[in-house]
Image (cartoon, helix red, strand yellow):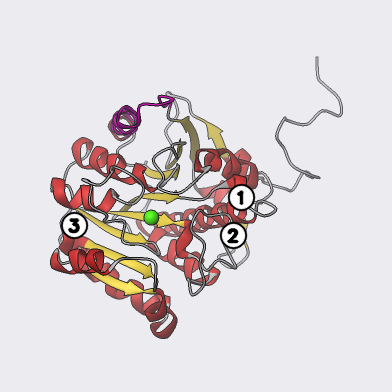
Amino acid sequence: MALTHIRPAGQAGFVDRFDHRASQWLRAWDPLRTFQVGLVGAPLSKTSISHSGAFQFPQSVRAALAAYDTYSIDADLDIADVLTAADVGDIALHPTDLRLCHQRIGEALHSYWSSAPNSVLFLVGGDHSITAPSLSALAQAVGGTIGVIHFDAHHDMRNLEDGGPTNGTPFRSLLDSGVLQGERLVQIGLRNFANARAYTEYARAHGVTLFTARQVARLGIADVLAHAWDIAAKGADRVYVSFDMDVLDQAYAPGVPAPGPGGLTIFDALDAMNWLGRQPKVCAFDWVCADPTVDVRNLTARVAANLLLQAAVGLAERNARTGSPE
Ligand code: CA
C-alpha cells in the first residue's frame, strides 16, 4: 500500500519533483552495485592533540548534503546524472584503544580498495591521524607509487616519540615508514605561528615542497596547483589529496579545533577540489579535522559538503573526457 504525505527520513526542507538532493545521490552501499565514488566515514577524534569532536564530522557532512542539490550551474552538469556514488558507511572503531582504531581504519580501507580499486574514495574524518592508515592501506592494497597533495595550516610532522600517533603526526609516520617519499609530498596552506621551526626544517630536509597560505594569496591557487601537480604526480601512479579544514581562513571554517586568520579562501579551496577531481591520477580525497560540536550553524560542514561536491564535479568532467572508469 502506498503511503501518503510521508517523505524519506533525513530529507531536509522543501523538496519538489525537480530537486536532486546530494544525500540521495549517495546510495547506500550494495555489494552487487558498482560505483565511481565511495564515501567512507572514519569517526575518530580521540587522537586529536586538542579537544575535538571530529568523530561527528561524517554525520554532519551527510546532514549538510541533504541541503544541497547535485546540479552545478558553473559546470552546467548534474552529477547525479553522470556519476554513481555509494555511501559505504562508517568504520567501526574501538572506544578506547587508539592503535586498534588505526588498525581497523587500515583494514577497512584495505577491504574497500580490494573491492573497488577503480573508484575514487571520499574519506571523511575524524582527525588527521586517519590519513596515515588510509594512505598505508592504499599503498598495500593497490600498490604503485603515490604522490600526495596536502592542504593544511600545519605540517603534521610532529615527532612520534612525544606522544604519537596523533593528528599532529600522520605525515611524519608516512615519511618515516617509507610509504611516502618527501619528494612526492606537497603541502599547501601552511601558516605563520602554527608550526615550530623544527618541523619546517624536517619537511625541507626530506624534500617536501611547501607553499604557505600567503604564497597562495600572492601566486593564485591555479599556479600553485600546477606547480604542486608537477611535483606530486611526476612518476606517480596515483595521487591522494588530503584536506584539513583548518587550511581555510577562520572566516570560512569556524568549526575546527585550530582556527586562525590568514588562511585559504573558499574559492581557493573549491577551485582546487574541482581541478584535482579532473586529474585522472587522483584516486582519493580525505577531509578531516572539523569539529561539529563547536561549529556555527553547521557552516563548516556545509563548506565540507561543497568541497566534496566540487570534487565530484571534477570527477564527472574527468569521466566525460576520458570515459568512465567503471
Ligand atoms: Ca592537519
Q: Quadrant of the C terminus?
A: top left
Please state the horizontal and vertical placement of residue 143, each as a whole percent of the image.
17, 42
- Near mark 1 (Cα within 10 A), the count class, few <14, some 14-19 or many ≥20, is some
Q: Quadrant of the N terminus?
A: top right
Please state the horizontal and vertical placement of residue 273, each as a whole percent of the image.
45, 61
Q: Closer to the camera: disc 3 or disc 2?
A: 2
Q: Secondary structure at mark 3?
A: loop
Magenta stretch: give its range. 92-112
- Near mark 3 (Cα within 10 A), the count class, few <14, some 14-19 or many ≥20, is some
Residue 325 in view in this figure: no
Q: Is residue 314 left or right of residue 59?
A: left
Question: Which residue is pictured at 25% across the width and 37% down the height?
Answer: 137
Q: Pointer 2: what residue? A: 254
Q: Nearer the viewer, residue 175 or 194?
A: 194
Q: Pointer 3: what residue? A: 236
Q: Closer to the camera: disc 1 or disc 3?
A: 1
Image quarter for ligand 1 equals: bottom left
Q: Nearer the viewer, residue 291 or 243?
A: 291
Q: Is residue 18 left or right of residue 132?
A: right
Q: Which mark is residue 112?
A: none
Instruction: Kindly identify the amino acid type of the residue bearing the numbered disc 2.
Output: Pro
Q: Kindly check if marks 1 and 2 are in contact, taking CB atoms under 8 A apart as contact.
A: yes
Please state the horizontal and vertical placement of residue 19, each as a whole percent of the image.
72, 48
Instruction: Kindly identify the amino acid type of the residue bearing the numbered disc 1.
Output: Val
Q: Pointer 1: what residue? A: 294
- Measure the C-alpha gap from mark 1 to mark 2: 8 Å
